Amino acid sequence: MLNRYIFRPLVVFFLLITASGFLFSQEIITADRYLDMVSEQYTAINDYEASVIIRSGNNEMTGNLSHRSPSFLRIDFTKPAEQVIVFDGDLLQVYLPEFRVALNQRIEKGRSSTVTGPAFASAQGLAMLKRNYVPSYDSGPNPVPLEANSRERVVKLRLTRRYVSEGFREIMLSINPDTKLIRRIEGRTIADGEVRFDFIDIKINQGIPEMRFVYDSPASANMYNNFLFRDSD
């Protein structure tokens, strides 16, 4: 019979070796690497459609979002009805039916201010985030509830700005662990306001035509150009 004083240490030693082998066999995915994985997923997406919910304070807007690589974006709002935002990579157009106003802004290449909100959920937007924000896990690499009492589980990445010039102090990405698609974006502005974007029923690579991003505002709308930047900015 094996001496118990020898047997016990052998069992402990065996368990330690087994556990260490298990741990070393698992890939440790850092927050930075996880953000790379999400970015790689979006790089492979030619276009996508989704329902979007935008919340800022007590205000809520809903609409249907279309994105086409590399930088085409359109939101047709259902709340407020008939409101439209369109960006074709060169011209940003916003139609506000409540005021019968059409806002237009030519965008110079490289202006980071144009990549905000829903545009973060694209290969171009994620590339900007990787340059200008430092990622970390909010509560570890394992999926957690999207919010209190939610059955939907996501991986949460907290992004902290590298430079004070960024419009958001901090950004939280909630990512579907299976698809690596962004389910929610939460941003805290420099004024300490909070903005949230929810993406629901995402459909990728539907063959969205470029013509979808051609938009003519109603002829009755009052036109305002360069509403974001002055020519001298």
Image (cartoon, rainbow, N blue to C red):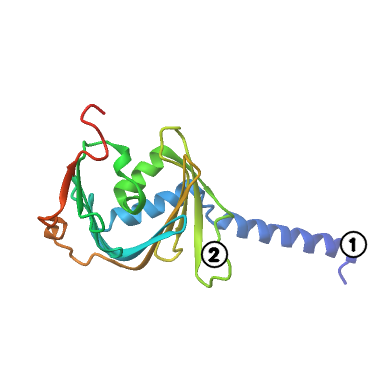
Residue in the image at 31% along x and 52% along y: 122
* Tag 2 residue: 147
- How far across and how far down the image is residue 158, in percent? 51, 49
Q: Amino acid at mark 1?
A: Tyr
Point out the tag, 2 or 1, that comes first from the N-terminus: 1
- How far across and how far down the image is residue 189, in percent? 46, 43
- Residue 83 appears left or right of 121: left
Residue in the image at 34% along x and 57% along y: 41
Residue 161, numbered circle: none
Q: Is residue 47 above or below residue 163?
A: below
**Looking at this view, is 212 or 151 the one in front?**
212
- Residue 109 appears left or right of 175: left
- Residue 67 visible? The answer is no
* Tag 1 residue: 5
Tell me the distance, in whole angstroms, between the alpha carbons under discs 2 and 1: 51 Å
- Residue 69 appears left or right of 133: left
Q: Amino acid at mark 2?
A: Glu
Residue in the image at 43% along x and 66% along y: 178
The quarter of the image holding the C terminus is: top left
Q: Is residue 139 above or below residue 191?
A: below
- Residue 219 visible? The answer is yes
**Looking at this view, is 128 or 103 the one in front?**
103
Local SS, label 1: helix
- Residue 140 appears left or right of 104: right
**Looking at this view, is 72 or 46 the one in front?**
72
The quarter of the image holding the N terminus is: bottom right
Residue in the image at 54% along x and 64% along y: 147
- How far across and how far down the image is residue 229, in percent? 26, 35
Between disc 2 and disc 1, the foreground one is 2
Local SS, label 2: loop
